[in-house]
Image (cartoon, rainbow, N blue to C red):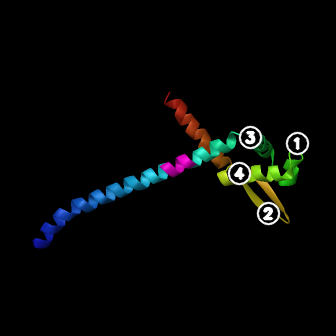
Amino acid sequence: MGAFAIDSYTRPCRLANNIFGLKQRRCAMMKESENTLDKKFQVLSNRTRREILMRLNQESHSAGEIATCFQITPASISYHLSLLQESGLISCHRVERRRIYRLNHDALDELYLWLQNLYKTK
C-alpha cells in the first residue's frame, strides 16, 4: 500500500510534465513552421526570385539556362537560386556536371494552405 500511495502522488506530477512537455514540443513545432513560412515569404518578396519560380513552373532548368533569361550576372542568379533552395521552394539535382533546378510544389502547397486558412478566418 505504501508504494501505491507514493505512486498516486507522483503520477499526476508525471502526467503534468508529459502534458507540459507536449505543449512545449507543439509550440516549438509551430515556431519552426512560422520560421519556415517567414523564410518562404521573405524569399518571395524579390521579383527576380518570383520570375525564376515562374520559369521553373514551366520546366526544370540549369542555372545557365535560367541566367540567359535575365539581365543579371551568373553570380546573382546563383545567389537567388541558393536562397530559393534554402527556403525549400526549389530543389536541385545533378545531371552529369550540371545542376538542374525544379520547383518544389509541396512548399508552394504549404504557402497556399496557409493563405487559404488566413482567408477563411476573415
Q: Does the rendering let one see residue 60? A: no
Name the N-terminal-most of marks 1 and 3: 3
Marks 1,3: beta carbons within 8 A: no
Residue position for label 3: 50
Instruction: State the CA–CA distance, disc 1 to disc 2.
Output: 25 Å
Marks 4,2: beta carbons within 8 A: no
Point out which mark residue 80 bears: none
Query: Dot 4: what SS?
Result: helix
Name the N-terminal-most of marks 2 and 3: 3
Residue 91 figure quarter: bottom right
Q: Residue at x 61, y 42 (%)?
A: 111
For the stretch drawn in magenta, the main secondary structure is helix
Residue position for label 1: 71
- Identified by mark 4, the residue type is Leu
Q: Residue at x 62, y 47 (%)?
A: 39
Instruction: State the CA–CA distance, disc 2 to disc 3.
Output: 23 Å
Name the N-terminal-most of marks 3 and 4: 3
The x, y position of residue 108, in whole percent, is: 65, 44
Q: Does the rendering let one see residue 71? A: yes
10 Å crowding of disc 3: few (<14), some (14-19), many (20+):
some
